[in-house]
């Protein structure tokens, strides 16, 4: 089958093939961000699950509902995805993509002010 690939995609892939360090640096930044996010969630006493991708699942403490916290985070500009009805240990978690250190810090601040340790 024929694939329709636009010029921007072709140029982007060409750039990455010619400069593999761009992708390597991005992967390193995501891994570092994931560790930083995990450390901060741990410090807040929040259960979390790291992935092999660029996102983390975390479970709100028992005293705050997942949907309530998801709505708070969304209203603060974070794009989150509630995880429910998967019949896995991730039910009741919130999924968030790992961002920059500044974005992670902002997320931790919102979490800290809303979970009321």
Image: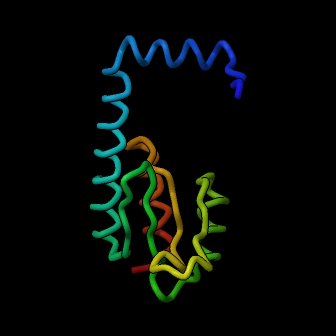
Quadrant assignment, res 24:
top left
Above/below status of 87 relative to 30: below
Identify the residue at horizontal 43%, vertical 68% (top origin): 112
Give the number of marks: 0
Q: Position of residue 39 (x, y in %)?
A: 27, 61
Q: As drawn, is 107 to the left or to the right of 81?
A: left
Q: Position of residue 26 (x, y in %)?
A: 37, 32
Q: Position of residue 79 (x, y in %)?
A: 61, 54
Identify the residue at horizontal 47%, vertical 66% (top origin): 111
- Closer to us: 20 or 101: 20
Q: As drawn, is 14 to the left or to the right of 22?
A: right
- Closer to us: 94 or 72: 94
Quadrant assignment, res 61:
bottom left
- Closer to us: 114 or 21: 21
Identify the residue at horizontal 36%, vertical 22% (top origin): 22
Above/below status of 24 relative to 90: above
């Amino acid at each position: 089958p024929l694939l329709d690939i636009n010029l921007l995609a072709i140029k982007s892939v060409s750039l990455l093939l010619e400069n593999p360090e761009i992708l390597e640096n991005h992967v390193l930044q995501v891994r570092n961000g994931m560790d930083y996010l995990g450390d901060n969630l741990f410090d807040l006493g929040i259960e979390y699950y790291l992935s092999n991708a660029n996102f983390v699942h975390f479970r709100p403490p028992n005293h705050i509902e997942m949907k309530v916290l998801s709505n708070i985070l969304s209203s603060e500009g974070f794009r989150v995805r509630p995880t429910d009805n998967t019949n896995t240990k991730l039910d009741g978690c919130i999924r968030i993509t790992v961002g920059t250190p500044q974005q992670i810090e902002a997320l931790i601040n919102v979490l800290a002010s809303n979970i009321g340790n």
